[in-house]
Image: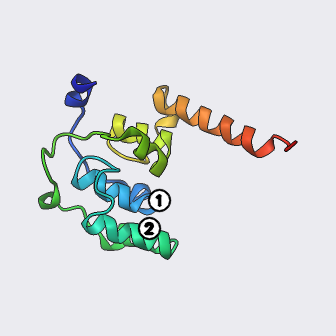
């Protein structure tokens, strides 16, 4: 696991979709290299509060107010990680967490190409279908 983490590429600024859909995690992923580790710090915390209490305003904050600045990167700017995979999956969902791990962006659309993200997306859709359309006893 540590060998694979050491080979992952540099952090890049999050996409517009990531900044709008998951503003706190996108900011944390860019600044700290982990989408779940710093959601309660600095700009990520502001985005989180706005996202929770003001619906789409957090996404608008992430998209239009926050700007990715290299001087805000903490630690080794060439590495990204998922220190708590379960927390990352709870915050953004399995396909997006895998996208961050593999491509460095929460909304990298990894489901379009063969790989772990595509399989996680299939399982997520199957589980959603099963839960929504299974009749209650």
Q: How is the image coloured?
A: rainbow
The residue tagged 2 is 59
Q: Is residue 95 visible?
A: yes
Mark sitting on residue 41: none
Circle 2 — which element? helix
Which x, y percent locates residue 112?
A: 52, 35
**Distance between the alpha carbons at the discs numbered 2 and 1:** 6 Å
The residue tagged 1 is 21
Which x, y percent locates residue 11?
A: 23, 45
Which residue is found at the position 37% from the left and 68% from the top? 47
Which residue is found at the position 36% from the left and 42% from the top? 100
**Disc 1: CA contacts within 10 A as few (<14), some (14-19) or many (>=20):** many
Above or below, comparing residue 96 to residue 42 in the picture: above
Which x, y percent locates residue 77?
A: 15, 46
Instruction: Identify the image quadrant of residue 122.
Output: top right
Which residue is found at the position 39% from the left and 39% from the top? 85
Q: Is residue 60 visible?
A: no
Above or below, comparing residue 61 to residue 85 in the picture: below
Q: What quarter of the picture does the N terminus occupy?
A: top left
Question: Which is nearer the N-term, disc 2 or disc 1?
Answer: 1
Q: Return the residue found at the far front.
A: 137
Above or below, comparing residue 49 to residue 118 in the picture: below
Circle 1 — which element? helix
Instruction: Identify the image quadrant of residue 99.
Output: top left
Q: Would you say 3 lies left or right of 51 here?
A: left
**Disc 2: CA contacts within 10 A as few (<14), some (14-19) or many (>=20):** many
Q: What quarter of the picture does the C terminus occupy?
A: top right
* Cβ atoms at labels 2 and 1 below 8 Å apart: yes
């Amino acid at each position: 696991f540590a060998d694979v983490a050491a080979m992952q590429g540099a952090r890049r600024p999050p996409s517009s979709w990531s900044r709008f859909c998951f503003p706190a995690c996108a900011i944390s992923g860019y600044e700290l290299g982990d989408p779940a580790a710093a959601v309660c710090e600095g700009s990520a915390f502001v985005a989180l509060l706005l996202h929770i209490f003001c619906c789409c305003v957090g996404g608008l904050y992430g998209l239009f107010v926050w700007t990715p600045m290299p001087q805000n990167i903490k630690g080794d700017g060439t590495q990204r990680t998922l220190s708590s995979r379960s927390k990352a999956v709870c915050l953004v969902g399995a396909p997006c967490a895998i996208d961050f791990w593999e491509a460095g962006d929460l909304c990298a659309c990894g489901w379009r190409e063969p790989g772990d993200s595509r399989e996680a997306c299939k399982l997520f859709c199957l589980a959603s279908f099963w839960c929504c359309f299974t009749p209650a006893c």
